[in-house]
Amino acid sequence: KTLAKAAKLIGFKEPIKFYSCRGTFIARMIDIGVHPMVVAELSGNSPKTIYDFYWKNTNEKDIKKLMWANI
C-alpha cells in the first residue's frame, strides 16, 4: 500500500511492485560503479545472478569508463 501511495504521489501510472524497485536498485548500483560483489551482498543474490540477470540492464559503455578511469 505504501509503494502504491508513493507511486501515485509522483504520478507513476503503471503498476509497481517492490521486486521492480529491487531490480532497479541493483542495475543502478552497477551503473554507478559499485562492485558486483557488494551489490550481490546488498541484494541477497550471488555475483553470478547479478551478472546473468542484471548486467544486461545497465549502461555498459558508462561502466567501462568507470572501470578504466582509475588506471
Image (tube, helix red, strand yellow):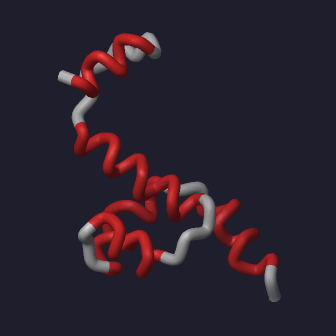
Horizontally, is 40 left or right of 63 in the view? left
The quarter of the rendered structure image containing the N terminus is: top left
Q: Is residue 20 above or below residue 11?
A: below
Horizontal side of 42 relative to 67 (left or right) equals: left
Q: Position of residue 14 (x, y in %)?
A: 31, 18
Say which residue appears at 45% left-offset and 76% top-offset: 36
- Tell me where residue 21 sits by quadrant: top left
Residue 52 is situated, as x and y percent measured from the top left of the image, at 33, 70
In depth, the one of 61 and 8 nearer the eye is 8
Q: Is residue 15 above or below residue 51?
A: above
Please tell me which residue is depicted at 28% across the width and 72% down the height of the picture: 49
Picture quarter containing residue 3? top left
The answer to which image quadrant residue 32 occupies is bottom right
As drawn, 2 above or below 23: above
Point 25% across, 69% down: residue: 44
Quarter holding the C terminus?
A: bottom right
Image position, residue 70 (x, y; %): 80, 82
Q: Residue furthest bottom?
A: 71
> Which residue of the protein is positioned furthest toward the front in this rendering?
2
Name the residue located 23 percent from the left edge and 34 percent from the top edge. 17
Q: Is residue 10 left or right of residue 68?
A: left
Residue 25 percent location from the top left of the image: 42, 51
